[in-house]
Amino acid sequence: MFNRPMQPDCTFYIHEFALRLPVGGSRVMNDQAMHLAFMANAHRVSIRIIPAAHGSFAGLSGGAFALMSDVDEQRLPVVCAEITGASLFLDESAIVEEHHTVLNELDRIALDRGQSRSWLVKLAGEYDRPGDGPNAAGVFDLA
């Protein structure tokens, strides 16, 4: 999708906890964080990190979703909600508006694009050092 001539504009909001869950060991964690950092440099891709300091966000209690809209707005926006074994495509205006509200809140609390990219590089660096991951507190200082 990201190598097509007509790439979509995509914004991904990822909670810090999802990126800190160790999967596959330090090398895999380093590679994944670096891949995300490189993707965050792509012209039409925005990766935004939700810091752990914000805790759990109530708007995400429904699970993962994607809000898709047409650039020229010829089609109604659609929410794609992920459930076990299936995806639901919802176009009711109240549901779409509720998801817009969630995205607005995520946009407010997330690190901006540059901060998120820096955070991902620091996370990758933590997994590239001797030892097995982030510092004991599990926190990075962005200063």
Image (spheres, rainbow, N blue to C red):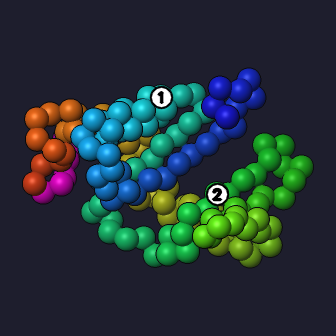
Q: Which mark is residue 41?
A: 1
In the image, residue 110 sits, relative to residue 8, either above or below, namely: below
The answer to which quarter of the image holds residue 121 is top left
Q: Residue at x 55, y 74 (%)?
A: 62
Identify the main secondary structure in magenta. Answer: loop
Q: Name the side, left or right, on which 63 lies relative to 70.
A: left
Mark 2 neighbour density, 10 Å: few (under 14) some (14–19) many (20 or more): some
Figure label count: 2
Q: Which residues are magenta?
A: 137-143
Q: Is residue 110 magenta?
A: no
In the image, residue 122 sits, relative to residue 68, either above or below, namely: above
The answer to which quarter of the image holds residue 2 is top right
Callout 1: SS: loop
> Farthest right residue?
74
Q: Which mark is residue 67?
A: none
Residue 7 at least partly seen: yes
Amino acid type, mark 2: Ala
Callout 2: SS: strand
Mark 1 neighbour density, 10 Å: few (under 14) some (14–19) many (20 or more): some
Counting from the top left corner in percent of width and height, residue 128 is at 21, 32
Instruction: Tell me the residue that label 2 is attached to.
Output: 66
